[in-house]
Amino acid sequence: MSIRTPICDLFGIDVPIVQTGMGWVAGPRLVSASANAGALGILASATMTYEELVGAIAEVKERTERPFGVNMRADAEDAEQRVDLLIREQVKVASFAQAPSERQIKTLKDAGVCVVPSIGARRHAEKVAAWGVDAVIVQGGEGGGHTGAVATTLLLPQVVDTVDLPVIGAGGFFDGRGLVAALAYGAAGIAMGTRFLLTSDSTVPDAVKRHYLERTVTDTIVTTRIDGAPHRMLRTEFVDGVERGRAIAALPRAIRNAFAFRKMTGTSWRAMLGEGRVMKRESDMTWSQVLLAANAPMLTKAALVDGHLDAGILPTGQVTGVIDDLPTVAELIERIMHEAEQTLKRLGTTTS
């Protein structure tokens, strides 16, 4: 039995599964492994300089001839330069964590690049659909990192009933049964982050992966104390301290990390201050809280890259509590598709 959906033809992939563009995690090794296994791998570029992105795209191409995508921020200072790079390198998919502009969508689509933003509310899906995107990734509240309040089981059918384009479900998916459930809701596939993070092809340190595997479904928290937006992550002593109001104690480190992140990504102080003003205005944050928000990418790097569990944050979906192994990406994809096919066969027997 073969399970093909519209996104298989749209992206040129074999299975309706997307590996999301997780900052500091979705690098060339994981993306190429996902692509070679028949899924869509998405390279995370928000935590890369432009030059690093150029090198990462080249490395993915060395590792695979299959289609892949790049996730980027639509409001990045060099967003137009990155759009041009994706077009020049004939990257198949441009993925966005925030809604791209109508001009960005048209530029990419005119060049044959599929545009796929991630959304967390029905109204956001309606907006980007009207602007002409090719598909949307719909993340429910179970998902890791920045997330919404509506569960996938409610948000996914809402969006499917609202827009006339392929919808990809995210938040809470980790196996073949979940894929079948998403298809039953009308989705064209699933996107997963935490499940791909917890594979042997992920470059996250083994000690950090073991820490994830030891957690339960109740060991995550959604907090706004890190950067002002709802953010699902593992509970740690550091996170609990921030939740109890110790954020100001971390201010000197936040200042150092903000300097480091600016230098690492090439972001100008003008751009960082501009984003800070927006955050302050829209989230009613103090300037101390805004500075701590600028610290968030480095807090994530501290844990996911450097392995400092006591000094960083670990974005994750609730599915971490039901994952207990570290397969290769190829093994994971094969397992999910086999489970999905067996589930469909069982349902067919039940209903016949």
Image: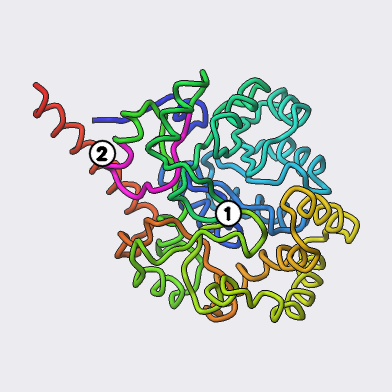
Badge 1 crowding class, 10 Å Cα cut-off, few under 14, some 14 to 19, many 20 or more, is: some
Residue 155 visible in rendering: yes
Q: In the rendered image, which quarter is residue 214 located in?
A: bottom left
The disc at residue 230 is 1
Residue at the image point whose x is 52% and y is 21% from the top: 163
> Which of pointers 1 and 2 indicates the residue nearer the eye?
1
Residue at the image point whose x is 73% and y is 79% from the top: 253
Residue 260 rendering spot, x and y as whole percentages: 78, 72
Residue 28 visible in rendering: no
Give the amino acid type for the residue marked by disc 2 in the picture: Ala
Tell me the SS state at disc 2.
helix
Residue 184 rendering spot, x and y as whole percentages: 31, 28
Q: Nearer the viewer, residue 289 or 254?
A: 289
Residue 28 rendering spot, x and y as whole percentages: 57, 56
Residue at the image point whose x is 40% and y is 57% from the top: 318
Which comes before the other along the chain, label 1 or label 2?
1
Quadrant of image for the C terminus: top left
User: Taking 161 as reference, is 28 above or below it?
Assistant: below
Give the amino acid type for the residue marked by disc 1 in the picture: Pro
* 10 inside magenta stretch: no
Tell me the SS state at disc 1.
loop
The disc at residue 340 is 2
Which segment did they paint magenta? 167-180
Q: Tell whether 336 sits left or right of 31.
A: left
